[in-house]
Amino acid sequence: MDGVAAQSRRVLTLCGRLANEVVSFFVFSLLDLLDTVLCLAFKVFDFVAEAEWKPCYCSSSSAREAIHGAGGGEILVSERGESRIVCLSSGGGGNGNVNKLRLDQVSDTLYTRPSVLHEVSESIKRLYEKRGKQTAAKAATVFAVDSAVVEMLQGRMVGKQPHPIPRWSDCDCEDCTSWTSRGRKSLFVKVAGDKGLSDKPREDVLFIHGFISSSAFWTETLFPNFSDTAKSAYRLLAMDLLGFGRSPKPSDSLYTLREHLDMIEQSVLEPYKVKSFHIVAHSLGCILALALAVKHPGSVKSLTLLAPPYYPVPKGVQATQYVMRRVAPRRVWPLITFGASLACWYEHITRAWCLLVCKNHRLWEFLTKVITRNRIRTFMFEGFFCHTHNAAWHTLHNIICGMAGKLDGYLDTVRDRLRCDVTIFHGEDDELIPVECSYSVQRRVRRAHVNVIEKKDHITIVVGRQRVFARELEEIWRKSSG
């Protein structure tokens, strides 16, 4: 009987996977079409509202055409080692302002996202094409600069602001635009633990949130649950990342790793005179945490990662495209995977979502509080609603996908140059980032300790167990300091 039951489960599982594949094919084929329609619609709306077209990453126009249409300028591409540098200079000879961008900071997944039908046709073509490998090798040498990237660089020229702040499709409430009135464009930072009850020098702890989140993910859960002893011994600094929460959301930013790290240094490390620190990071924030640790290897006292999105890339495979398909495999089930696929593959559908939800987040917050009788904590809204499409779209691609080829090097540096403890927490039921990602980190950094939390997912690894997790962090910091 047991054998029959096991066989039945295998058959049902296989049927479920097949149904998911078939339904996903049709659903995402329709979404490909819808995204194309919305592309045209937003071009019209942008022109009506702002009197200009907004380049997008599905545009077929070349970089040079984009520059020529903007009224002059010159694009220069040079190589320094393995990095390509894009320089865009304004007209006027040698006196023009020059903007530089390391092209390896910009993920090709921004502008290389083939449709479902195209991928199927290419797969069939490769089966019958004897010279497939030669063709692929040849194609890999083609170098292009997307027009939307050029448009962003042009926006940084002196005296040129490409778009109003906020844009017509972004929220204009006080929380979302408060950064425009601040003299210095710095991240929003929440500081706690400044009681000064201890004679010992206070240690600093940096909290870095994940994608579509904010500092409230930490301040509304962990901060109230730290003991008085911890609050007197540690200064807790939680920031809203660039483009999220109450931090700046510049419309001309590409939200690259360098921009995120620069803002953390300028807004946290420098003004608060942070010399050494512990790091606690969640999801996408783990990538920023690793990059920060690599940049300041002698300053990190402990490194705590929650659900790190690390996918080891097979040899001979393009890292950015591989990780995009792992994070967002274009499947309708589970629902969190469907949401990730929408966010990663469809530029204009996600912009429509931001227009509907983020721009009107005050209304949605009010309605949800009325329906649930205020049973849902407001910090979840702040993270989910308070961002712009430009910030979310570029951060997702340039950090999670774009850094895929560099994480091996970051982890090797943590293993070889850092002497701090590395602790990883992962929810057993996390359907967005599988537990295997944490074990992959451990295989790279042998001293890393992995804690798999039963019956917890990507969010409830913190939310719902904040008191227990606060004690776990205090113990990690105590051991590291000892």
Image (tube, rainbow, N blue to C red):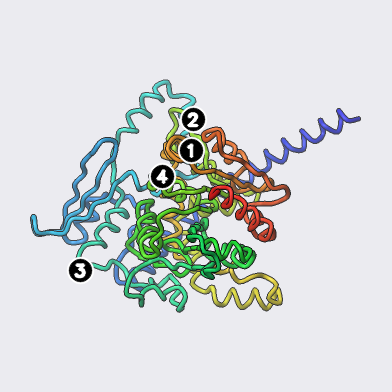
Label 4 vs 2, first from the N-terminus: 4
**Image: 17 above or below 271:** above
Front-most of residues 18 and 100: 100
CA gap between label 2 and label 1 equals 9 Å
Tags 2 and 1 touching, CB below 8 Å: yes
> Above or below — where is 451 with respect to 162?
above
- Reading the image, the residue beneath label 3 is 159
What is the x, y in percent for residue 450? 62, 41
Label 3 secondary element: loop
Locate the N terminus and report the quarter of the image it occupies: top right
Q: Secondary structure at mark 2?
A: loop
Is 142 left, or right, of 288 in this rendering? left
Q: What's the residue type where badge 1 is placed?
A: Tyr
Give percent across and percent down for residue 350. 49, 59
* Residue in front for this viewpoint, 177 or 227: 227
The kind of secondary structure element at disc 4 is loop
Which of label 4 and label 3 is nearer to you? 4
Q: How far from the left and from the top, in percent, is residue 331?
A: 60, 46
Mark 4 and mark 2 residues within 8 Å of each other at the beta carbon: no
> Nearer the N terminus, badge 1 or badge 4?
4
**Alpha carbons under labels 4 and 2: distance apart:** 28 Å
Earlier residue among tags 3 and 1: 3
Would you name the residue on which mark 4 appears? 297
Q: Are marks 3 and 2 in contact (CB under 8 Å)?
A: no
Mark 4 and mark 3 in contact? Answer it, CB < 8 Å.
Answer: no
Kind of element beneath mark 1: helix
- Seen from the viewer's position, the closer of residues 128 and 454 is 454
